[in-house]
Each structure stands twice: as C-alpha cells, then as structure tokens.
Image: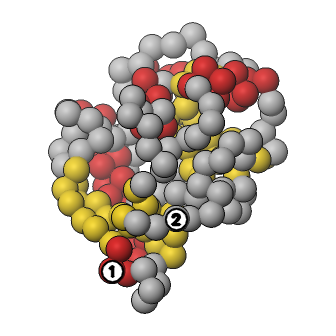
Amino acid sequence: MTIILTDFARARLFPREPRRNTIQDITPEQFERHLNDVPPLTVLDGYAPFCKLHVHRNWTSTRCLTAPITDANRHLLRTDYEARTKDELPVLVRWFEGLDPPVADYLIVILYSREQLAKEGTDTTADWGVVGCMYTAEPVETPMAPITMMRNALGVEEGGSGVGLDRAAYLRAVEFWRTHANWRG
C-alpha cells in the first residue's frame, strides 16, 4: 500500500509559516516516508467507506489538537467565520488562543482512497492520500466537527466529500464539541 501527502493536507499540516498547532519537528517528506515505512498501530474505519484512519504513536513533539473547555480557560475562546480554501464558503469556527495543551500520544492520520481523491480533483497513483491528521491523547478518533459534516453533505463543489449527513453521528459530535475546542498557537 502506498500513501501520499495531498496538497490539501500539506498546506494544513505543514504551513509555509510554521505554527505551534501543526505537526512539529519533521518535514512533509519525512512524514510521508514514515507513513509508508512504519505500519500503523491499528487501522480504524472512517466516516465513509473511502476513508481510513491510521493510528500511529506520536514520534514528534506535536501537541494535542483539542482541549476541554473549563471555567478556567473559557475566556480564551475565540470565534470567526473562516474558509479552509479560497473556494469554500466561510463557516463559524471556534478555538482557544493562549492555551498550551500537552504533547499528543498519537497521530491519527486521515486517509482517502485514490478513487475519492480523484472525485475531489486530486489524481494520484498512490493507493491512499492523507487529507488530515488528528493529534490525540488516546488512540481513538476525535469526532468530526459538526460544521465539517455539514460541509461534506454540501458536496465536493462546496469543499465537502459528498457524504450525506448522519444525524446520530452529528449529535454525538455536538456532544463532544460543546465541551472541547481546538487551539491556535
């Protein structure tokens, strides 16, 4: 099995201007090589048949991507409307500023199949492409943000994957994201 780092994921995980809440200590090429050379601890099913999650022990100093919202840190929450790319519609997002989460124990790599990548405009000869990565304390998936589920349901023309909304999964995600937020460094 071969894995590539898609341009979409490269821009988010390894931005030109490094940030503290992205992957640390390695280059995109080293990351891709590690994924091809080191088998994952486990493989989880993603939200659709074309999506798999490869769970790896964190071999970097990358920090957990989410943190619980508490009375002590609630004042650090920020919100804005943002789009991940110039072609997407901006959506409401929330994050912490000024928070220092612990180093993640796991990197959970989100992979899409070659066929799905082609539907979304990325042609490759690799079997799988990285579209994202979760940095977690536990070897389990962080629920997809509800707004990401909605964007996916809108279709590829709006920056999603075309997978319809699963009401039960959406409600589970809301429960998690009501009490957690991402952070920015």
Identify the image quadrant of the C terminus: bottom left
> Residue 167 location, x and y as percent?
41, 67
Neighbours of disc 1 within 10 Å: few (<14), some (14-19), many (20+): few
Query: Who's the residue at 58% across and 35% down the image?
Result: 111
Q: Above or below — where is 60 with respect to 72?
A: above
Q: Name the residue under label 1.
A: 75
Mark 1 vs 2, N-terminal side? 1
Identify the image quadrant of the N terminus: top right
SS assignment at label 1: helix
Pointers 1 and 2 in contact (CB under 8 A)?
no
Is residue 128 visible to us here?
no
Query: Who's the residue at 78% across and 39% down the image?
Result: 40
Which quadrant of the figure has residue 113?
top right
Is residue 174 visible to us here?
yes
In the picture, the disc for residue 100 is: 2
Query: Closer to the camera, 121 or 106?
Result: 106
Query: Closer to the camera, 152 or 68?
Result: 68
Count the marks.
2
> Residue 135 location, x and y as percent?
60, 52
Query: Closer to the camera, 60 or 135?
Result: 60
Query: Who's the residue at 69% across and 21% down the image?
Result: 33
Q: Above or below — where is 124 with respect to 68?
A: above
SS assignment at label 2: loop
